[in-house]
Amino acid sequence: MSENETITQELCKEVDMKDGEMQEFQVQGQSILLVRNNGIFSATGNKCSHYGAPLSKGVLVGDRVRCPWHGACFNVRTGDIEEFPGLDSLPCFKVTVENGSVCIVTTKKALESTKRVKSMSSRSAGDRSSVVIIGTGPAALVFAETLRQEGYTGKIVMVTREKHIPYDRTKLSKAMNVKAEEIYLRPTEFYKEHDLEVWTEKEVVSINTDEARVKFKDGSFLQYSQLLIAVGSRPRELKCPGSTLQNVFYLRCPEDAVAIFEAASSKNVVILGSSFIGMEVAAFLADKARSISVIGKSDVPFQAVLGKQIGEEAMKLLKDRGVNFYMRTEAREIRGNNGQVNEVLLRNGTLLPADVVVVGIGVTPASNFLKGSRIAVDTKGAIYVDQFMRTSVPDVFAAGDVVSFPLAMMDGHRANIGHWQMAHSHGFGEGYTEIVMKGTLEELKFLAFYLKDDVVVAVSSMNFDPVVSQVAEVIFSGKRITKKDVLAEDFVTAIKKL
C-alpha cells in the first residue's frame, strides 16, 4: 500500500455511540479518537501532542477534549490545540456514515502523523515592522508561533543568553544526562522554515523604551516595533559561606544538568531545597550517587505547595530508595579543601560529607536588566501586566514566570507563578487555606483539593485521572467548585454536574 492510497475502515455502528461520548479505535496500528456530538461524528489522533497521553481517557465537554495528564485541550472537530501545554494540534480525519456504519477515510501517511503544525505566514520584504522577544521559553515560543499563525509578516527575533534554541526545561531535573538536542521544542529547521530568528548567547543588559531599543552585553543593539519580555526566572542564590566552592551547582540549563550528573556518580550529594527541583534531582540520582541528603526548611518536602500529607508520602518514597532527609534546617556553611567542596554544616549542627552540592532554594524573576527602565515591576522583580499582558509602557508586553498578572479566577488578585503550563497560557491557583484529601496516599491513588474561602483554587492527583481535567473544565467555564461539592459522597458526579 502506498502512503497516499485511500484507506476506508469501519470503526463502529452508529447506534453504538451516544452524543457526548468518545472512544479509541486502532486503524493500521494507529490510535484514533472518535467523538459523537450533536449527532455528528469527528475523528482526530488520540495522542496528546504534549507527552502522548491517551485523550480517550480525558474529559470531553462539547467539542473540546482535555488531556488527562497535563490539561492540554483540543477541538475535536478541527484538531486545533486550544489550551496548553504543548505546541501542536492533532491530525484530523474524514468520517463518513453509510448504512449505519461509521467509517474513517484517510491515508497511511496521514495516519502516521501524530501531530499537526498549524499553517503559518512568512516574512514579507515589504513589512518593515519587527517584534523582538527576550527569552526562549514556552511563553516566548508560543508567542512567536502565534504571530505567524495569525498572519504577521514582519521580522521576529528571539534572543537568549543561552547556547540553545528553545527546549523543554522541565526535563532537566528528570533526565539529567539528556543531550540538549533531544529536548528541543522545535528542530533547527523549523525556525528557518517560518522565518523565526533565534539569537543565542546574546545577553540583554538594558532596554531603552523611549528609543525602542534593546542593548546587549557585547555592546550591540536591536530595534523593535513591539517587544515581549519572557525571560522566566533564575535560581535564587545561596548566601552562606562556601557557596562559591567548586562543585556547588545550580540547575538552569542543559550544561548544568550534565555537569551535575557527571560529578555525582558514586559521590556524596547534598541537595539544598526540598521542592520540585530538589526532589526530582534526588529521585534521578538515587541509584547513581553514593549517598544523597536532602535539606529543607519545612517539615516535609513540597509542604508549601502540595501540603503536608503529600509531602510526607513523597519523602517516604525517596527514603525507601536510600535518600536521607534533614528537615527544619538549612546550610550554615559549605566547607572544602583546595577550592573543592567536601562537607556541609547545617544550622542544627549536623555535618554531612559532600562531594557535590545542588542548590534548589527557589527562583526569582530574571528581570535585573530592567533596572532604570520605565517598565514597572513589583518588589520581587515581577513585571506588572494587565489581562492582555501589557506592561506599563506602550508596545512592551511580558509573559510567563517573569510577570505579575491579574488572576481571573481569584477576582483579579495578582499572582506570579512559575509553572510550565502557565507560561504557555496563564491560569493557575495561588494560595490556599485548606486541603481536602480523597483516596489513599499509601496506595498512591489520591486527589488533593486546595481551597481558599471554601472554594477550590487548585487540585493535584496521582492515579486519579481524569478528575483534575474535570476540575479544570469547571473552572474554565467560570463556575466554582465549593467545599460542599468536594465533600459530597459521590464528589466526581457532583463536579460533573456543575
Image (cartoon, rainbow, N blue to C red):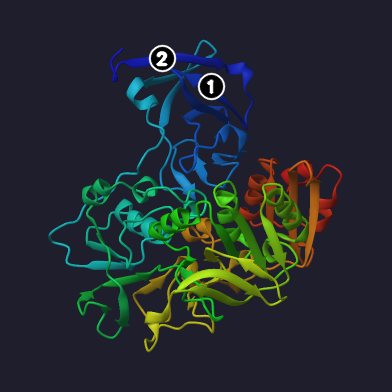
Q: What element carries label 1?
A: strand
- In the picture as drawn, the residue positioned furthest to the right comes out as 489
* Amino acid type at image mark 2: Thr
* Amino acid type at image mark 1: Phe
Q: Quadrant of residue 3?
A: top left
Q: Which of marks 2 and 1 is nearer the N terminus?
A: 2
Report x, y in % for residue 99.
51, 10
Q: Are marks 2 and 1 in contact (CB under 8 Å)?
A: no
Q: Is mark 2 on a helix, strand or loop?
A: strand
- In the picture as drawn, the residue positioned furthest to the top comes out as 99
In this view, the residue in front, 313 or 328, is 328
In this view, the residue in front, 228 or 313, is 313
Q: In this view, does 111 lie above or below 469?
A: above
Gap between marks 2 and 1 measured at Cα = 14 Å
Report x, y in % for residue 406.
56, 71
Q: Residue 397 carries which label?
A: none
Query: Would you say 280 lies left or right of 198 here?
Result: right
Do we see residue 481 in this rendering?
no
Q: Which of marks 2 and 1 is in front?
A: 1
Residue corresponding to mark 1 = 25
- In the picture as drawn, the residue positioned furthest to the bottom comes out as 372
Report x, y in % for residue 163.
30, 61
In this view, the residue in front, 38 or 290, is 290
Residue corresponding to mark 2 = 8
Do we see residue 29 in this rendering?
yes
Residue drawn at x 62%, y 22% as measured from the top left: 17
- In the picture as drawn, the residue positioned furthest to the front comes out as 337
- Where, quadrant-wise, is the N terminus in this rendering? top left
